[in-house]
Image: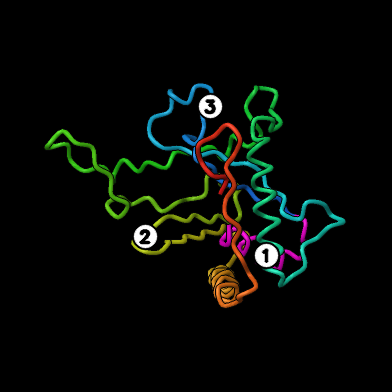
Amino acid sequence: APLLTAYYQELTAVTGRPDLVVGLAVSGRDRALPDAHRVFGPFAGAVPVRPAGAADAPLTEGEFGGALRRIVAEAEEARVHEDVVPRHADGLPVTSQFFFTHLDFAALAPRDDGALRVAWEAGDGVFLPPSSATDLFMAVRPDGDGLRVTVRGSAAAFSPDALDGFVRSVRGRLVRAAGNRRVVVPPPRKRRGAGGAAL
């Protein structure tokens, strides 16, 4: 949630628009989805999160704690309603372009001993955006005792220097929030009918 908060706040600063909808990738194995057994390996879909809540209730720039609480609440609400995402005429959800698998087959170890092993570093996957229409994409994964954050931007939306500046600003927001004793990360609430936490 803190990473999503810093990402959202920097997006609003760059675009000048506080009322944005951010796609949040959600693991497809978190809950039983229809036909999930047909998909091999791990996969994710996106739910739309609107952190501002409404145009008449914008988040104030710099209020990281308030923005964090709002984003957690909006993400939980989006997860509750992820089944009711509008659909195209062909029946696919409008977010189907963001459905993606994240198993890099190049990362699979040889099956010499009959066991399946996967290593993040063994493959050449680079968390490419799920669609060529995606202007900005952030992926986060565990890496040792920390997190590895990958940010990719389209050439049409960001120059290399602008993308580096965006990443530095997101990092700066997180560093400032970590040093602020008033920012308290709320614990994730259990979702009704699910075994996992919302965030």
Mark earlier in primary sequence (1, 2) = 1
Residue 82 visible to the viewer: yes
The answer to if 140 sits in the magenta stretch is no
Image position of 107 (left or right of 102): left
Tell me the crowding category of disc 3: few under 14, some 14 to 19, or many 20 or more residues within 10 angstroms, Cα based.
few
Tell me whether circle 3 and circle 1 mark residues in contact (CB < 8 Å). Answer: no
Picture coordinates of residue 26, whole percent (x, y): 54, 42
Q: Nearer the viewer, residue 167 or 190?
A: 190
The answer to if 12 sits in the magenta stretch is yes
Image position of 40 (left or right of 14): left
State the residue position of label 1.
9
User: Of the residues shown, which amino acid type is indicated by label 1?
Assistant: Gln
State the residue position of label 3.
33
Distance between mark 3 and mark 1 Cα atoms: 32 Å
In the rendered image, the vertical position of residue 108 relative to residue 33, given as above or below: below
Distance between mark 2 and mark 3 Cα atoms: 29 Å
Residue at (41, 53) in percent of width and height: 126
- Mark 2: which secondary structure? strand
Q: Quadrant of residue 157?
A: bottom right
Q: Give the extent of the magenta segment.
A: 1-19
What label does residue 143 carry, if any?
2
Instruction: Report how many numbered discs are placed on residues in the image.
Output: 3
Distance between mark 1 and mark 2 Cα atoms: 24 Å
Picture coordinates of residue 98, whole percent (x, y): 56, 40
Residue at (57, 50) in percent of width and height: 188
User: Of the residues shown, which amino acid type is indicated by label 2?
Assistant: Asp
User: Of the residues shown, which amino acid type is indicated by label 3?
Assistant: Leu
